[in-house]
Amino acid sequence: MILHIDMDAFFASVEQSSNPDLKNRPIAVTGSEKRSVIITSSYEARHFGVKTGMVIPEAKKVCPHLIIVIANFEKYASTSKKIMEIFKKYGVTEVFSVDEAFIDIGNESPSYIATSIKSEIKRQFGITCSIGVGKNKTIAKLASGSNKPDGYFVADSFDKIRDMPIDEVCGIGKKSSAKLRLLSINTIADFVNKEEHVLKKVMGIHGIRLKLALLGQLPEPVNPKHPAPKSVSNSMTLPHDIWSWNDIQRAIFQLSEKVAFRLRCYNLWGKKVSLYVRYKDFEGFCIDKKYYQYTNNEQEIYQRSLDLLKNVRLTKPIRLLSVSVTELAPAKQLSIFGQKNTNRLEAIDSIRRKWGFNAVTWGILLNKYEHKPPISPAWRPERY
Ligand code: TTP
Ligand code: MG
């Protein structure tokens, strides 16, 4: 049997447990005081309709007594690391996100282990979690989400999951679920009863795998090794909306520097560069291009991003920018492949390994935008 554990309102719960004034109150965690959206909220706030992604005024409208707490990402990262260490005592553990993990418990009693984990986490960190049990990871994850908060759900037969909506299934995103709904596939039972050629048409081979997984016929081994990332990206909500070309270039370089450094930490490079632009009114667009050569060099990523912008007419001041590199592969030795500034990059990296990321930077970035990068759900203890 496999357990999936997901902390309840993770960042908000960590805040509530460390500050008695916040206990049992509607609170929302945001990246910064003014220009940021809600990252998560306590269940007390969710009862009023507060949702992740809302801007603060919108959330205050539905919940006037909402308490805003500025995120303390270091605290969540260190709590996450400690929680994952607890899980590892109970079986082979796959860390799935900042607050989620799968544990293969073999033939042990799920209810005994779930009770032990819940009480240990409650005692040490004062927070609750929801636990799902299933034959494989897909089913266990569905189960943990079905009874939040402080839930425990054993999905030991198909009947336990058959009526759940398909968009609860991990791996069915918004686009696929919209397509499936058009075909009157609303529940998991609808999905597995549909002809395979239809599932394949909508979701490719992934649709067939998902059907087998939901029927409990696909083993999904818990993998304690972390898969290499498929993309490396950084985004930044600017301290104020920007409009001048100079400011835009500087922000893009700042993001490219971070993305390139993280790629080099993973010893990866990538071919495709994407740029996401969000205007001050939250309208946005994404542009990307696949290049022939791999790169993990900030100047190259920067040039490619500017290249993408060349054919775009910006129409409004910009609130947020994001740079990402995908189509990744293990990097070959830099100097052989004629990347620019190889020695300089190697020197920068060795300084940073010793003194941290901010110890050294490029002249163009002497005046950096103030930015505390958030940790996203995809954050893992050993990720850069
Ligand atoms: P989730 O597990 O998705 O959410 P949650 O733990 O807050 O609430 P739930 O009880 O429904 O599980 O994400 C874990 C943490 O990741 C969350 O506390 C905040 C952070 N997060 C983001 O930074 N951005 C996001 O878009 C989401 C969804 C979460
Ligand atoms: Mg959670």
Image: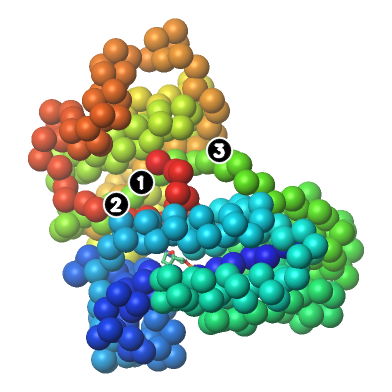
- In the image, what residue type sits under mark 3? Ala
Q: Is residue 272 above or below residue 217?
A: above
Where residue 135 appears, as percent x and y from the top left, is 79, 64
Is residue 334 rendered to the left or right of residue 23?
right
Is residue 299 rendered to the left or right of residue 203?
left
Precedes in sequence: disc 3 or disc 2: 3
11 or 88: nearer the viewer: 88
Label 2 Cα crowd, 10 Å radius (few <14 / some 14-19 / many 20+): few
Q: Secondary structure at mark 3?
A: loop
Residue tagged 1: 234
Q: Secondary structure at mark 2?
A: loop
- The residue located at (43%, 70%) in the rendering is 124
Q: Which quarter of the picture shows residue 200?
A: bottom right
The numbered disc on residue 353 is none
Q: Which quarter of the picture shows residue 55?
A: bottom left
- In the image, what residue type sits under mark 1? Asn
Residue tagged 2: 373
The numbered disc on residue 228 is 3
Q: Is residue 179 visible?
A: no
- The residue located at (53%, 60%) in the rendering is 86
349 or 234: nearer the viewer: 349
Q: Is residue 312 visible?
A: yes
- In the image, what residue type sits under mark 2? Pro
